[in-house]
Image (cartoon, helix red, strand yellow):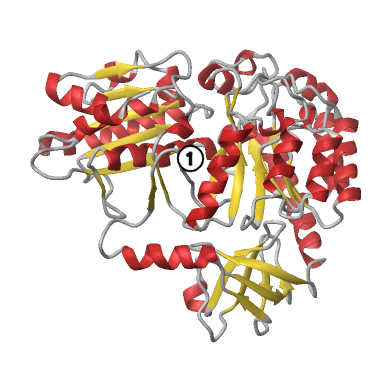
């Protein structure tokens, strides 16, 4: 682990340097970027203004490796920064994340103007590597083969004052043929329950009212510590934390989704009626080729049990279309599961080769035009189902946690936006009284679209919260220092929960 004294080496005696972080991929990368921000700010850097687009003193790429063209995208972005770096003496470029872990030996060869390359296991080294590169005037490439310290011990600059990611594990023990994450993130490592709960309590003390438990395979939690019911116990323990209003988790795996987890969800009031359960395919043949250790009946059985225990649960999923060898009959099985499961939302992906995965060299690669046609049919079906399911919400009275930046048209429509308990996006009429992100409003749903709900009538009730107080305090202080909340060790946090990030590790 990098000590605070090591990190202080990155402070420039001539004044604070600015930094910009560009994040690609899954929620784990988003959370890692918050840790990188925390490390850099502890070392004396300041965040560059929004829209700086490479004008910072340090530009960090936190990369993802699960897409076929991930490297092309990275090298294209690095190429665009090369002339700017030449014109700006002292500017540094760092590349981290999954692609850095994978292509450690080639990044500096292809882009010799890169100053630092670091991996997924040693993000805490970034400030000292930048300083070493500056002093030695040569690129520093340092990739750890295993986790040096659980990342949650690092300082973190979180973007939201009222909602946070909390990592409960890193790595994955599965061997899905389309996914390279286990090779880059390593085997699953679980945090101790006491450490997780202590972090959540610290976040709540700061004003956070919603947390999302995060892991590559979040409900496998406990396999590393020898307790098969550790995840359900953790959910129940979250229920006893005073001031914690909403608990979510992502992403689970059907193989590890057990009845005790369903019971804990149903019986713990602050665990939200929402589940993101990756299907990937409805065909048993394709699931076997993917090395997904469940079949269609098992998946639909889980959905049925969840709906029986939590009738109003909104269930979302990930689906890959056009996996090698997928026949029309296989695809129709996926369509069948979508009709049966009636997902509130599906994140659909056209299969693309992940370099380094078994699926990339499988026979039976599907022609692009066939994949596109199937994809469009699936999207059309899911749009229809999403709209029908959302229409069932019309007339319901919901408690909506007000969000920041969720409604792009809120200014023009005089509305505010937030998330219902089941994570559906709700746009509601702006009330006369002040409402802050983190506060909770009670509204009646009057209209449904496939991807959002509207509450066009008056707001029935506004509940000011400690989370709203925390947002107001942060906003008031923003004029004096960069926006965000710095938490001292070991208290860390994360941005407001978002829908699953498309194209990242959550599709595994």
Q: Which residue is mark 1?
A: 31
Q: Residue at x 66, y 37 (%)?
A: 251
Q: How many marks?
A: 1
- Can the viewer see residue 133? yes
Using residue 13 as the reference point, say whether residue 39 is left or right of it: right
Q: Nearer the viewer, residue 444 or 227?
A: 227
Q: Position of residue 419 (x, y in %)?
A: 63, 62
Q: Residues within 10 Å of mark 1 (few under 14, many from 20)?
A: many
Q: Residue at x 27, y 65 (%)?
A: 479
Q: Quadrant of residue 328?
A: top right
Q: Nearer the viewer, residue 28 or 13?
A: 13
Q: Position of residue 431 (x, y in %)?
A: 57, 83
Q: Position of residue 71 (x, y in %)?
A: 42, 26
Q: Nearer the viewer, residue 472 or 32?
A: 472
Q: Quadrant of residue 392?
A: bottom right
Q: Reply above or below: 189 against 219.
A: above
Q: Residue at x 24, y 36 (%)?
A: 81
Q: Quadrant of residue 214?
A: top right
- SS of the residue under disc 1: helix
Q: Position of residue 61 (x, y in %)?
A: 36, 34
- Can the viewer see residue 332? no
Which image quarter is the C terminus in?
top right
Q: Reply above or below: 145 against 3.
A: above
Which image quarter is the N terminus in?
top left
């Amino acid at each position: 682990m990098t000590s605070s004294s090591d990190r202080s080496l990155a402070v420039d005696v001539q004044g604070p340097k600015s930094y910009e972080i560009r994040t690609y991929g899954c929620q784990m990368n988003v959370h890692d970027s918050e840790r990188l921000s925390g490390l850099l700010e502890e070392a004396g850097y300041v965040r560059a203004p929004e829209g700086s687009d490479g004008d910072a003193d340090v530009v960090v790429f936190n990369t993802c490796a699960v897409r076929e063209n991930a490297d092309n995208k990275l090298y294209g972005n690095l190429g665009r920064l090369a002339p700017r770096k030449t014109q700006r003496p002292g500017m540094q470029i760092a590349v981290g994340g999954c692609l850095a872990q994978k292509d450690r030996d080639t990044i500096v060869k292809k882009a010799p103007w890169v100053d630092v390359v670091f991996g997924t296991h040693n993000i805490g080294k970034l400030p000292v590597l930048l300083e070493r590169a500056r002093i030695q005037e040569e690129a520093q490439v340092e990739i750890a083969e295993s986790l040096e310290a659980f990342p949650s011990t690092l300082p973190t600059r979180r973007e939201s004052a009222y909602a946070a990611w909390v990592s409960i594990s890193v790595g994955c023990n599965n061997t899905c043929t389309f996914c390279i994450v286990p090779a880059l993130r390593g085997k699953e490592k679980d945090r101790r329950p006491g450490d997780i709960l202590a972090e959540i309590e610290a976040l709540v003390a700061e004003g956070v009212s919603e947390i999302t438990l995060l892991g590559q395979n979040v409900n496998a939690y406990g396999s590393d510590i020898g307790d098969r019911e550790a995840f359900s116990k953790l959910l129940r323990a979250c229920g006893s934390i005073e001031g914690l209003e909403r608990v979510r988790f992502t992403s689970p795996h059907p193989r590890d989704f057990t009845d005790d987890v369903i019971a804990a969800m149903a019986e713990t009031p602050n665990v939200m009626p929402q589940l993101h359960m990756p299907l990937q395919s409805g065909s048993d043949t394709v699931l076997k080729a993917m090395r997904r250790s469940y079949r269609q009946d098992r998946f639909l059985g889980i959905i049925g049990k969840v709906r029986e225990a939590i009738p109003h649960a909104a269930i979302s999923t990930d689906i890959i279309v056009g996996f090698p060898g997928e026949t029309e009959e296989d695809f129709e099985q996926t369509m069948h599961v979508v009709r049966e499961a009636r997902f509130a939302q599906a994140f659909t992906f056209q299969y693309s080769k992940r370099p380094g995965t078994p699926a990339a060299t499988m026979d039976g690669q599907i022609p692009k035009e066939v994949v596109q046609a199937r994809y469009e049919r699936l999207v059309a079906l899911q749009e229809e189902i999403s709209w029908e399911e959302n229409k069932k919400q019309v007339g319901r009275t919901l408690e909506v946690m007000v969000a920041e930046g969720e409604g792009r048209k809120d200014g023009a429509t005089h509305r505010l936006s937030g998330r219902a308990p089941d994570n559906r996006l709700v746009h509601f009429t702006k009330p006369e009284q002040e409402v802050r992100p983190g506060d909770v409003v009670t509204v009646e749903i009057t209209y449904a679209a496939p991807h959002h709900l509207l509450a066009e009538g008056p707001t029935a009730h506004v509940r000011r919260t400690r989370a709203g107080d925390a947002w107001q305090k942060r906003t008031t202080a923003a004029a004096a220092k960069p926006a965000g909340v710095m938490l001292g060790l070991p208290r860390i946090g994360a941005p407001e929960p978002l829908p699953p990030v498309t194209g990242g590790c959550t599709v595994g």
